[in-house]
Image (cartoon, rainbow, N blue to C red):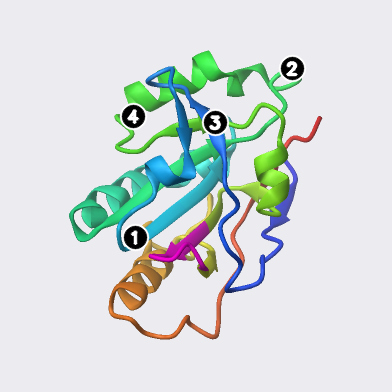
């Protein structure tokens, strides 16, 4: 496991479009089909990363807590499945079903979507406003495997609350940290 931080895509960047396989439904999903009316959270993730495993329930809780407020979440895995078979689409589907993901779990086979978002780690978190402009990028909260900070999604929740209230993007944003994306 190598620790990697987010690249911090510039705020105001328009969300790059995508059309990816949803490993649960077997159907392709576009950005337009998964976006929220008020905000959209996109998380680059995978099955095997201990940093993702540590926050899986937090991601689920945040998605469920904000779904009725017009905020949707989508999770994308871009890892090289030839060398990391535990991140393959069939295993992604199993994880999503077992954990009862309330969001699509998409597979970025070509890794082009991760590159378009300048994603670097898992989890790598992006919050876009209703116009799909980047409002926040960074961590869910201060919790990491091995520390005692609560797994409460405080940072992403604060950013979602702010975007819903029409506030300016927070000046101070902390990068996410986790395993590096496994590039081909």
Given this view, does label 1 or label 2 mark the residue nearer the observer?
2
Identify the secondary structure beneath mark 3.
strand
Do residues under tags 1 and 3 come within 8 Å of each other at their CB atoms? no
Residue occupying image coordinates x 47% and y 59%: 143
Residue 104 horizontal side relative to residue 17, left or right? left
Residue behind mark 2: 82
Q: Is residue 44 above or below residue 153?
A: above
Q: Residues within 10 Å of mark 2 (few under 14, many from 20)?
A: few
Q: Which mark is residue 99?
A: 4
Quadrant position of residue 97: top left
**Mark closer to the observer (1, 4):** 4
Mark toward the start of the polypeptide (1 vs 4): 4
The local crowd at label 1, few if under 14, some if 14 to 19, many if 20 or more residues have their Cα within 10 Å, is some
Asked if one can make out residue 120 in the rendered structure from this viewpoint, the answer is no
- Quickly name the residue at label 3: 20
Residue 38 percent coordinates (x, y): 31, 63
**x and y percentages locating residue 105 in the rendered image:** 45, 32
Q: Which residue is mark 1?
A: 152
Asked if labels 4 and 2 touch by Cβ distance under 8 angstroms, the answer is no
Name the secondary structure under disc 4: loop
The magenta span reads 126-133
């Amino acid at each position: 496991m190598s620790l990697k931080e987010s690249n911090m895509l510039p705020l105001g960047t328009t969300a790059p479009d995508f059309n990816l396989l949803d490993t649960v439904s077997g159907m392709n999903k576009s950005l337009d089909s998964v976006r929220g009316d008020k905000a959209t959270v996109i998380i680059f993730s995978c099955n095997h990363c201990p940093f993702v495993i540590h926050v899986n329930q937090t991601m689920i809780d945040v998605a469920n807590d904000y779904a009725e407020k017009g905020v949707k979440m989508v999770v994308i895995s871009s890892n090289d499945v030839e060398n990391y078979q535990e991140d393959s689409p069939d295993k992604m589907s199993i994880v999503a079903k077992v954990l009862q993901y309330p969001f699509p779990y998409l597979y970025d086979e070509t890794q082009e979507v991760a590159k378009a978002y300048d994603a670097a780690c898992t989890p790598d978190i992006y919050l876009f406003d209703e116009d799909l402009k980047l409002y926040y990028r960074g961590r869910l909260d201060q919790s990491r495997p091995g520390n005692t900070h609560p797994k409460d999604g405080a940072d992403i929740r604060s950013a979602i609350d702010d975007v819903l209230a029409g506030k300016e993007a927070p000046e101070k944003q902390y990068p996410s940290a986790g395993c590096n994306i496994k590039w081909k």
